[in-house]
Amino acid sequence: MTVPVNVTVTGAAGQIGYALLFRVASGQLLGPDVPVRLRLLEVPQAVKAAEGTAMELEDCAFPLLAGIDIFDDPTAAFDGVNVGLLVGARPRGPGMERSDLLAANGGIFGPQGKAINAGAADDVRILVVGNPANTNALIASAHAPDVPADRFNAMMRLDHNRALAQLALKAGVPVRDVANVIIWGNHSAKQYPDIAHAVVDGKSAVDIVNDDAWVRDTFVPTVAKRGAAVIEARGLSSAASAANAAMAHVNDWVNGTPEGVWTSVAMPSDGSYGVPEGLVCGFPARAKNGAWEIVQGLEIDAYAREKIDVSVAELIEERDAVTELGLL
Ligand code: NAI
């Protein structure tokens, strides 16, 4: 049997953790021939719950699951990590200001970045899911100077999948016939879900939909505010769909995106599309040989430019706020 891949999952006892771990252990994260060793990180008060999940994982007798370890210390949890799924984060509590939220998460993602720097394997790939995901990824990366910054991603894939699904519904086609939407910017309500380059059954989505008002007034806000709509309906935030998106993101990153298809990934900007260098921003991206490349040369019209700039401005504000708090 090949050497197992170390997959560290933070927030393992949370809702997304519960939706994620069984799929990772079953081999869906990396492929049907790749054994995995799970390293779960939780806060001390949730370790017992994580132990319960670990019991259930054992009880599944997954042939690819090579072991499970549970930690409340990031240095131990990230020792030897190949793939890190950073799900655990501090949610916004009642009366909490944005700067309090950023500071609380800086206190989580700074030390986790340090631990990744100290112990990660050379091929480490980190996907930040916990919100505010883009800025948490920036903080973690800043504390891991020995790890290339492009190994830190934040998750836009759930927004991407939501956009694919809404477009398929509108076009009246199965979702598999829709591709190449883009989620630009921040994973927040200010993201810009863009169908300008999307295809439906190989044809221009804009032409098929032929309804600019629907795109601007229905599609964009529906995708951008879908998280809040799920909370409103379910009483809890998206969990299985978030876990599903994390699985797809990492699988594509490691194994490559299908020919002719791109996805949406928040990764450090190289200045593409006028996004300031270093900001962890949502871009259209393809994966090849284990690395993402931003899809270049797409035409951006004035409307898209404005929407992208609004989202990027929010990322800059978040970066400035965490810089001021001494978190970078
Ligand atoms: P949850 O509250 O059910 O679970 C979070 C878990 O993280 C808890 O078990 C908690 O004990 C743990 N945790 C907190 N601090 C930790 C630390 N320092 N180290 C390790 N574990 C820690 O939350 P849920 O629903 O699983 O969501 C997790 C995060 O994912 C939230 O920040 C949520 O906003 C975010 N999210 C992101 C999405 C995206 O598309 N990027 C989509 C949906 C959720």
Image (cartoon, grey):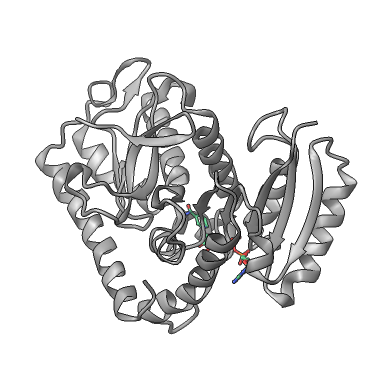
x, y percent for residue 166 = 41, 36
Q: Residue furthest left?
A: 302
Ligand 1 position by quadrant = bottom right
Q: Quadrant of the C terminus?
A: bottom left
Decide: is 169 above or below 81: above
Q: Residue at x 63, y 35 (%)?
A: 30
Q: Nearer the viewer, residue 168 or 75?
A: 75
x, y percent for residue 315 = 28, 61
Q: Quadrant of the N terminus?
A: top right
Q: Residue at x 57, y 66 (%)?
A: 115
Q: Nearer the viewer, residue 80 or 326?
A: 80
Q: Is residue 16 left or right of residue 45?
A: left
Decide: is 246 above or below 196: below
Q: Is residue 248 visible?
A: yes
Q: Residue furthest top?
A: 202
Q: Is residue 274 left or right of residue 222?
A: left
x, y percent for residue 16 = 62, 55
x, y percent for residue 182 = 32, 38
Q: Is residue 215 left or right of residue 91?
A: left
Q: Residue at x 63, y 68 (%)?
A: 74
Q: Is residue 174 visible?
A: no
Q: Residue furthest bottom?
A: 95
Q: Residue at x 28, y 33 (%)?
A: 195
Numbered circles on residues, count: 0
